[in-house]
């Protein structure tokens, strides 16, 4: 059964589209600003698991329907007669999603179409690349609820924008617009809102033509480099390069270079 066929049984809150090796995951609760309820989180985690097992998928796009990317946790669901057990909520739902996205061998592009707030911002930060519509914004609104940034925000932000800027965004809870996000390195590029889909698919198409094994190993190296010294990083690069050098795609790349033609990578 294909990824698209398996996804057909998922709730309408997550749309899964597959085209030419590119899968687009669309958070589809526009009336709730794509806030993450129990069903949407479960569907997203299942989709990530299926993508991890499907070697035909080359690139993942994550975006939202309507005017928001994701407003974070659906607080109506989190509320109840007693205090919410946020520690369990995070460990059982958000942590597997964030770790799943980072663990995918495929590049993940966040197409940030609108506001990304709370855990929705964390979801955007977990993507490998972020393309933002000019009307998009990010806000770590946790402090307004007397909570701390979670779902990886305190890990991703200092690495993306530096400790001082990360502290400012976390402490003040001020929103940051797309242009400023690009200036400080939080997003890779900003495009007009009406071209976000086309621009993101063009980038995904470019990545999908690259050698998938090499991209996956590169993602591993970049992830690991954040928590190791130079000597250890050099050794890890050597190990991964040894794996890459034994692939059929490497041999094809050498032939294509010699023949002065575009390579035709098969993923093997």
Image (cartoon, grey):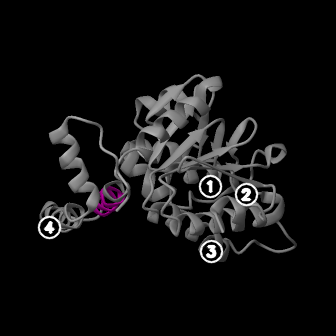
212 versus 50 height, above or below: above
Q: Disc 1 or disc 4, which is closer to the eye?
A: 4
Give above or below for 74 relative to 183.
Answer: below
User: In the displayed image of the protein, which residue is found farthest to the left?
Assistant: 231
Q: Earlier in the sequence, mark 2 or mark 3?
A: 2
State yes or no: residue 217 in magenta: yes
| Sequence-wise first label, 2 or 1 | 2
Disc 3 designates what residue? 87
Q: Which residues are magenta?
A: 216-226
**Is label 2 in contact with label 4 (beta carbons under 8 Å)?**
no
Query: Is the C-beta separation of discs 4 and 3 under 8 Å?
Result: no
The image position of residue 86, as x and y in percent, is 67, 71
Q: Which mark is residue 119?
A: 1
Q: Residue at x 71, y 50 (%)?
A: 27
* Residue position marked by numbered label 4 in the rendering: 235
Figure disc tally = 4
Q: Report x, y in % for residue 149.
A: 56, 57
- Inter-mark Cα distance, 2 to 1: 8 Å
């Amino acid at each position: 059964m294909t990824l698209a066929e398996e996804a057909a049984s998922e709730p309408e809150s997550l749309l899964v589209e597959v085209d030419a090796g590119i899968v687009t995951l669309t958070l589809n609760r526009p009336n709730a600003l794509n806030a993450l309820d129990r069903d949407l989180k479960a569907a997203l985690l299942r989709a990530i698991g299926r993508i991890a097992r499907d070697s035909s998928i080359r690139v993942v796009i994550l975006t939202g329907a309507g005017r928001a990317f994701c407003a974070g946790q659906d607080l109506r669901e989190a509320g109840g007669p007693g205090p919410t057990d946020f520690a369990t909520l995070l460990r059982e739902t958000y942590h597997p999603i964030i770790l799943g996205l980072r663990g995918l061998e495929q590049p993940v592009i966040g197409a940030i179409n609108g506001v990304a707030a709370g855990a929705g911002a964390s979801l955007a930060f977990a993507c490998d690349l972020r393309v933002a519509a000019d009307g998009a914004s990010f806000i770590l609104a946790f402090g307004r609820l007397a909570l701390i940034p979670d779902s990886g925000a305190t890990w991703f932000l200092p690495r993306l924008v530096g400790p001082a800027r990360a502290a400012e965004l976390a402490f003040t809870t001020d929103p940051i617009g797309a242009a400023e996000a690009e200036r400080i390195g939080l997003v890779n590029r900003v495009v007009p809102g009406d071209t976000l889909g086309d621009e993101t698919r063009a980038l995904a198409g470019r990545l999908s033509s690259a050698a998938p094994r090499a991209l996956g190993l590169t993602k591993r190296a970049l992830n690991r480099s954040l928590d190791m010294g130079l000597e250890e990083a050099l050794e890890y690069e050597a190990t991964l390069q040894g794996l890459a050098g034994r692939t059929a795609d490497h041999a094809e790349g050498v032939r294509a270079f010699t023949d002065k033609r575009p390579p035709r990578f098969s993923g093997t």
